[in-house]
Amino acid sequence: MPSTQLREITPAARLESVRYAIRDLACITDEVARQGHKILPLNIGDPLNFDFQTPAHMIEAVYQAMRDGKNGYSPSSGVKEALDSIRGEAARKGITSIQDVFVTSGVSETVDICLTALLNPGDNLLTPCPDYPLYSAVLAKIDIRLNTYYLNEEDGWQPDLDDIKKKITPRTRGIVLINPNNPTGSVCTRKMLDQIAELARQYNLIIFADEIYDKLIIDDTPHVAMAAVAPDVPVITFGGLSKNYLAPGWRIGWGIASGEASVIKPYLDGVNKLLRARLCANHPEQYAIKAALEGPQDHLVEVKRKLRSRRDLTMKWCSETSRVSCVAPRGAFYAYPRIDIPEGDDVFVIELIRQKHVTVVHGSGFGQRPGTKHFRIVFLPDEKTLTAAYTEIGDFMRERYP
Ligand SMILES: Cc1ncc(COP(=O)(O)O)c(C=O)c1O
């Protein structure tokens, strides 16, 4: 029936539970910046905001691809040269039972496609708590209720295996493992990987192994890929150029599907349907994948040197500051200190931005055990900026919680 009055266009009700704390805080930060204050940004995991640069040979490869006319759509799974390179990288990591490889617009799209292709109404997927919030946002978007398992702070933020066992239901289809972890910076032990693989076998689960930070292990211990320890288990390993290769704006990620062919094949048909429906990932940027994975890796030495120094500075501040304690991060560029304060960590974070112009993200934005409070630090800024930010946070805490 035509209406004579314009009415509000409302969003889908399921979006009620879509949250993305990291970017949601940006509104308050913008407001403070508009008032003329200089912000000390410890909230967004983009190395390019700081003293890190995309390796020149990767930029050259993209430029060359554009000049060579690689500006149309690419095949939906990605260009052959990139797919071959990703397979080579997977083999170097000990992943043997590869069944498919595909390139996406960042790991963000890998997550979206892989979760959407798996879950029916009423199904659930185990996701970590604390969690990189994209997972719960995608689950909300497709109307799947959350089923989270705890990471255990007392055990260096390793997954809580007993909690995982308790949370598996007849409708649990898979488990997400973020390793190295965002927001805690923890790295899974080999024993933990074996135990999770065993559960996946027992309960017929697919594992989504988000290993986007796998080359950023600060202490140089080798990263062990989940798919390498469990060649028989269906695993999709997520990787990309955003973090290890300092090119987040190019939006290049990928998925490596491994496991028993007959088990994973029907699911991969579903994934490929969605890959075709969205046409393709950025085309010229895909030509940086070979340059990245097979070219010089020198930048990683410098990146890890900076991360080590900035992690150590962060840990020193945490150990010297009352009301703060922190498990030392071993990978990625995040620390997740626990805070003992008489108010919510969301209030802490908002007041910290307003009063001291330092942006961090509240633990409740990632999820945490009831009764605990945290905030996430991105320790990508240089030592001078970090020191200034930590001085401000320390002053803020002393003034607010005398
Ligand atoms: C654990 C994790 N997975 C996925 C992503 C998204 O990465 P991309 O830039 O490839 O979409 C991020 C980004 O911060 C992340 O921390």
Image: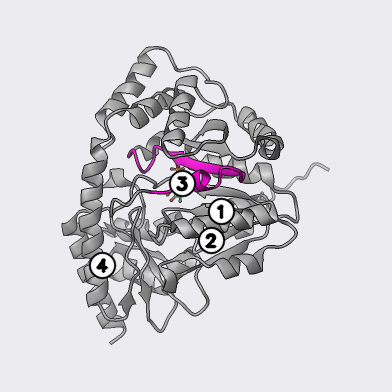
Label 3: which residue? 225
Q: Secondary structure at mark 4?
A: helix
Name the residue rendered at 39%, 46% in the picture: 214
Amino acid at circle 2: Pro
Label 2: which residue? 128
**Quarter of the image containing the N terminus?**
top right
Residue 247 is situated, as x and y percent measured from the top left of the image, at 35, 37
Name the residue rendered at 38%, 81% in the picture: 341
Spatial CA span between label 1 and label 4: 28 Å
Is residue 389 shown in magenta?
A: no
Q: Are discs 3 and 4 less than 8 Å apart at CB?
A: no
Spatial CA span between label 2 and label 1: 7 Å
| N-term-proximal mark, 1 vs 4 | 1
Q: Is residue 71 above or below residue 256?
A: above
Residue 19 is situated, as x and y percent measured from the top left of the image, at 54, 58
> Is 37 positioned to the left or the right of 249 in the image?
left
| N-term-proximal mark, 3 vs 4 | 3
